[in-house]
Amino acid sequence: MNTKSSKTVIFHEAGAPEVLKVEQIQVAFPAAQEVRIQVKSIGVNRADAMYRQGMYIENPIFPAQIGYEAAGIVEAVGSEVSNIAVGDVVNVVPGFSLHNYASYGEYINMPAYAVHKYPSNLSFDEAASVWTSYLTMYGMVVHSGQLQAGQFAVINAASSSAGLAAIQMTNYVGGIAIALTTSSKKKEALLKAGAAHVIVTSEQDIAAEVLKITNNAGANLILDPVVGAKFSNLLSSVTENGKVFVYGALSHEPASFPAFDVLMKTPTIRGYSAIEVMGNMEVLVPAIAFIDKGVTERKLKPVIDKVFNIDDIVASHKYLESNQQFGKIVVNI
């Protein structure tokens, strides 16, 4: 059974992007229920940076590999794999421990259950950019948030790949997307990306603008990966019995809590992790079908911001952490 020599990203200590090294390793022939993929594109996610820093839901065990998303061509299959064949064009659905599998490599083994034959209208770059963002947003907008047609969703950090996926997912279910951005330079692009309204938070009061847009009703759903100094103002824009999901903490500033508004409007405020979808097959299977349908109908389509080569993996993580991007960062091999 043949091994493959693979250019692979490894890190030997937690820290800044510079800890990431490109090394040559041997990738074994896949085990009985595994698939080996020749990778064409890798999706870079905020979770990757957190894992690299040792600030994620699991800690790296060194030497560590990294990455949840990739797309490529099946190069070998294990003896018990029946639904995937050599030559299939596939992407990787995150739903595994980074201690066991990782996507930043020229050749990667993956568990067969995480390997998916995606709709043919996606490029490799787009296919490597689907699952983390869209499964996260399916979980909040559709599964837990249950956004209905005509309802308002406020999407913070809207120019990230997750934020753009949230705009598309909101539109797909018939909701009205209100995008938040700190930069007025991104306003036009967000409107083109499908946002019905854009609020520039460095220049405008969030709650006042949301109440104006919603005719004083407030937002039915708030998706916030930032928190920080404007969290209180953001929460004040929620409607009565609305839902607020906090799925990140990009701001390092302290947040205050609008106790009076919360007592008056009784919203549900909760943390959210995509593990709720990715770690539960009863939710994951319909989520994949829903997203595939949206992709086939061209209603859900990843926005690619910038493409790096694997040799420039450090630069790709530095760019991620600069927060300049509008959409997904992808790495090619």
Image (cartoon, grey):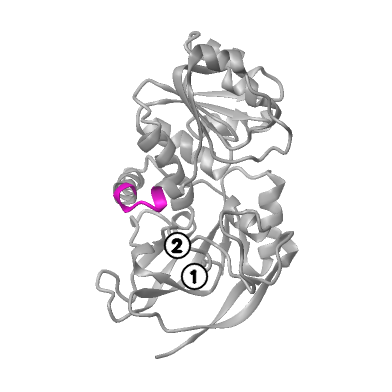
Residue 317, horizontal then vertical, whole percent: 67, 57
Report the quarter where the N terminus lies: bottom left
C-alpha span from label 1 to label 2: 7 Å
137 or 229: nearer the viewer: 229
- Label 1 crowd (10 A; few <14 / some 14-19 / many >=20): few
Residue type beneath disc 1: Asn
Membership of 97 in magenta stretch: no
Above or below, 223 against 160 in this view is above
View extreme (top): residue: 216
Q: Which mark, by number, is residue 96?
A: 2
Q: Name the spot of residue 133 as percent of width and height, x first.
A: 48, 46
Residue type beneath disc 2? Phe
Q: Quadrant for the C terminus, please.
A: bottom right
**Left-right relation of 35 to 313:** left
Residue position marked by numbered label 1 in the rendering: 100
Q: How many marks?
A: 2
Mark 2 crowd level (few <14, some 14–19, many ≥20, 10 Å Cα): some
Q: Which residues are magenta?
A: 277-283
Say if residue 210 shows up in the picture: no
Q: Residue furthest left?
A: 82
Work out whether residue 57 or residue 224 is closer to the camera in this orientation and state it. Answer: 57
Whole-percent x, y for residue 326 in the image: 60, 42
> The residue tagged with tag 1: helix, strand or loop?
loop
Overall secondary structure of the magenta stretch? helix
Q: Residue at x 58, y 42 (%)?
A: 160
